[in-house]
């Protein structure tokens, strides 16, 4: 089984168009891009895929050792791009996939034309001189709850991630996505996500990058988005009028507009 089959790659758009690769966040799958990706099909080759242990990815794609760090996921992305051989791609990473994209681009800059980092966070835990949005105790409690009660954790956290309490269908969609994720890889991916520290990787980025930040985000607050922007040399920062951590669902038109401005510049 090749990499495209393992990760359930879906191709659309213009066959000879510049490639745009969309990577979903923790606990999600490629369907989370259904309101954004079609906007790029008229003039790009659009690539969607599922991370190992997520969505419709083949179970064989997940390896507990390989995927115990974000480097393993970055290696998967590199393998996909090598196999697709579409040329340097625009990589659009949501949430944890932002840092996966950073790691992959730092390792193989020849495969990446630009990075679009949507709601990125290089470190979720507060430390002296750095505000990640969570205390170490809060992250420990979150992971412990996930270990003991995955269903309850999903139902509790998904609406917080989605934000927009006036639009409960967004939180319900995330809840459903979490519950359709195999709990064991899901718990491990959560631990890898929330305990990683990729701050030192940001200054090494040489791929032109856009940081897209929602004005209100409980998972990756504004201070974190600005930190990423300030530490990636030459990056652009766009604050969109959206609430929650998933503008690909809650404000797709604003996200598409920000991306278009960046890609057309």
Image: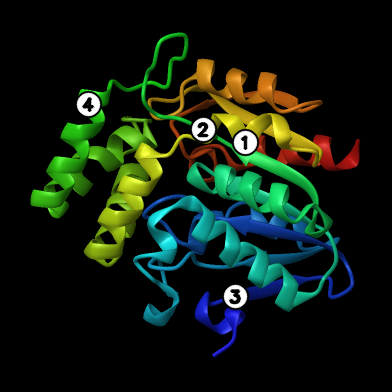
Name the residue located 41 percent from the left edge and 56 percent from the top edge: 28
Name the residue located 71 percent from the left edge and 78 percent from the top edge: 83
Label 1 or label 4, whichever lies nearer to me, is: 1
Whether the residues at callouts 1 and 2 have beta carbons within 8 Å, the answer is yes
Vertical order, 233 against 260 (above or below):
above
Name the residue located 59 percent from the left edge and 63 percent from the top edge: 75
- Label 4: how many Cα within 10 Å (few below 14, some 14–19, many 20+): few
Label 3 or label 2, whichever lies nearer to me, is: 2
- Label 3: how many Cα within 10 Å (few below 14, some 14–19, many 20+): some
Vertical order, 128 against 83 (above or below):
above
Q: Which mark is residue 145?
A: none
For disc 2, the marked residue is 122
Residue 47 falls in image quadrant: bottom right
Whether the residues at callouts 4 and 2 have beta carbons within 8 Å, the answer is no
For disc 3, the marked residue is 9
Measured Cα–Cα span from mark 1 to mark 4: 25 Å
Label 3 or label 1, whichever lies nearer to me, is: 1
Vertical order, 135 against 112 (above or below):
above
- Label 2: how many Cα within 10 Å (few below 14, some 14–19, many 20+): many
For disc 4, the marked residue is 138
Q: Nearer the viewer, residue 101 or 22?
A: 101
Q: How many marks?
A: 4
SS state under label 2: loop
As drawn, the residue found furthest toward the bottom would be: 1
Quadrant location, the N terminus: bottom right
Label 1 or label 2, whichever lies nearer to me, is: 1
Q: Position of residue 148 (x, y in %)?
A: 8, 50
Q: Position of residue 105 (x, y in %)?
A: 71, 50
Q: Earlier in the sequence, mark 3 or mark 4?
A: 3
For disc 1, the marked residue is 201
Measured Cα–Cα span from mark 3 to mark 4: 35 Å
Q: Earlier in the sequence, mark 1 or mark 2?
A: 2
């Amino acid at each position: 089984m090749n990499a495209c089959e393992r990760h359930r790659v879906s191709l659309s758009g213009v066959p000879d168009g510049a490639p745009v690769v969309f990577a979903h966040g923790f606990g999600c799958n490629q369907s989370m891009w259904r309101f954004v990706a079609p906007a790029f099909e008229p003039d790009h080759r659009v690539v969607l895929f599922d991370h190992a242990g997520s969505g419709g990815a083949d179970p064989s794609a997940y390896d507990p050792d390989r995927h115990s760090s974000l480097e393993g996921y970055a290696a998967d992305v590199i393998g996909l791009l090598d196999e697709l051989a579409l040329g340097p791609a625009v990589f659009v990473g949501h949430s944890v996939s932002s840092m996966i994209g950073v790691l992959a681009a730092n390792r193989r800059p020849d495969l990446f034309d630009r990075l679009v980092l949507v709601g990125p966070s290089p470190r979720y835990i507060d430390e002296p001189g750095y505000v990640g949005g969570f205390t170490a105790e809060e992250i420990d409690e979150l992971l412990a709850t996930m270990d003991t009660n995955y269903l309850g954790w999903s139902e509790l956290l998904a609406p917080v991630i989605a934000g927009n309490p006036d639009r409960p269908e967004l939180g319900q969609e995330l809840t459903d996505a979490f519950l359709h994720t195999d709990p064991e890889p899901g718990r491990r991916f959560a631990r890898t996500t929330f305990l990683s520290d990729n701050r030192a990787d940001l200054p090494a980025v040489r791929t032109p990058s856009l940081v897209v930040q929602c004005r209100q985000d409980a998972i990756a607050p504004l201070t974190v988005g600005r930190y990423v922007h300030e530490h990636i040399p030459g990056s652009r920062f766009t604050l969109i009028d959206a609430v929650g951590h998933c503008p690909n669902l809650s404000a797709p038109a604003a996200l598409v507009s920000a991306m278009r401005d960046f890609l057309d510049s």
